[in-house]
Structures are given as structure tokens and as C-alpha cells.
Image (cartoon, rainbow, N blue to C red):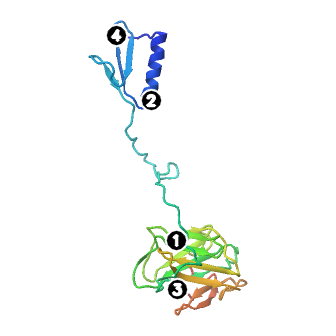
Amino acid sequence: MPFYLSKKQAAVIGALFVGFLAGGTLLWRQHGAGFLSANLGGAWYGSGWTEIKPRTEALPEREDAGTKNAPAKTEKTAPVVWCDFAAAPVAAQKSVIINEIAWMGTAVNYSDEWIELKNISGQEISLAGWQLQNKNRKIKVVFTGDETLLPQGLYLLERTDDDSAPQAAADKIYKGALGNQNEALYLFDDNCRLADAAMAPAKWPAGDNLSKKTMFRRAELGWQTSALPGGTPRAENR
């Protein structure tokens, strides 16, 4: 059966619905004559009232949540506090080192740079909170809690995309270029202690820009030029 509203009733109910949308509770009933009465918050009592509440329950998660079509909600994280290489104490013992650097890029593109880390300790190491920076901080990498290195494990960082070392899959993509001179790379642990460094005050101590041979670590941690152009990303140094 239809019901009817006077102008006054419509105005009152409009105001009531504004309160309802703001979080109130709407009570309504229809009189026998077909008129509608309403109020907020139970100011009127008696039989015949129907309560209407705003919908507040959580909606079910979409089946494609977390995909590119419906990215999952993420909690805000604290801003990164970047380590200062000028004031960083040196770690007492090396555990993860900068193992190989393609500072010269590849024959395909000079910007195809990559950096390889290696765990030289006898135990698995979590990289959570570790950082990698270059001298002018154009390269600034922070590692997360799910990144670990097994003993003698290798970790490959490629510049811009996963094509910098096409023969190996990247563990992480980074931005920023390495200079061919007056450059440095600093690896910090989760306490901002300097875990390792590679220095090029005048030029890099190894590697060749013309042949695109990389610079890698020997067993005693000195630097050497790779035997092959392109080096050995994610593989034994040679």
C-alpha cells in the first residue's frame, strides 16, 4: 500500500536521514492513514517501530584482491633512516660482501649494470634492514624481512629491469647509475655498521670498460677482472 508525505514530513525525514548517514539509528512506522513517522535514536517509544541502522560490517574481500586489478591494502611503514657512510662503524667481521660488480654495463648497453652480493659466513643471514648505497646516493637500496642468504649464497641486483644480466634472474631491481671513477659502493648491516665496501677513488680496481669484463672478489677478498665479458652473475667467479 502506498504512503504519502506532506512537505513538512519530507523536510523532517530528510533531516533525519542526514543524521542516519552520519551514523545514527532511524526508527520508522507507517500509520493507518498511510503517513510515515520517523525519528533518530529511539526518542519515541511504543509498538510498531522498525529500526534501520547504517551498514557498518566489513565487505567481503574481492577474489582478485592483491592483484594488479585490485591491489591489497598495505599498512603504512615507517620512513627509512638511511645509514651515513661517513659516520658508520665498521662491522667486526665480514659476513655478506659485495662479490661482483658490472660497473661498465654490457656490450648491449652501458647502462646494463648489476651488483652481486655473497654470504661468506657459515650461517643463513637475514638481509632485513640492510642497505646498499653508492657515493652520491643515487643508488639507495633497502632490504626487507623476507630476503635471506644461505651460506655461500649469491644475491643479484640489476639496474632498472631484469635485462641487465639476461643470463640470470634478478633478486632485486634498483635505480641509479654507477660512475666509472670517483665512485664507491657501501653495504650496511641492519645496525648501520659498514659490512663491506668497494672503492673507486680514481678508477675501479678491476674490470674493463672496453671488453665489458666485470670486477669480482678473489678468495682473500681482493679484486680481479673476470675472464669472460659479462662476468658470472649468480655463478662462481672466474
Instruction: Give the distance between the C-alpha atoms of the residues marked 4 and 2, in whole angstroms.
Output: 24 Å
Q: Earlier in the sequence, mark 4 or mark 3?
A: 4
Which of discs 2 and 3 lies nearer the camera? The answer is 2
- In percent of the image, x 63 and y 71: which residue is there? 137
Label 3 sits on residue: 236
Q: Residue placed farthest to the right in the image?
A: 210
Tell me where residue 1 sits by quadrant: top left
Viewer-proximal residue, 70 or 10? 10
Instruction: Give the distance between the C-alpha atoms of the residues marked 3 and 1, in whole angstroms.
Output: 17 Å
Residue type marked 1: Asp
- Numbered mark located on residue 31 in the image: 4
Residue type marked 3: Glu
Q: Earlier in the sequence, mark 4 or mark 2?
A: 2
Residue type marked 2: Leu
- Numbered mark located on residue 171 in the image: 1
Task: State the SS at label 2.
Answer: helix
Task: State the SS at label 3.
Answer: loop
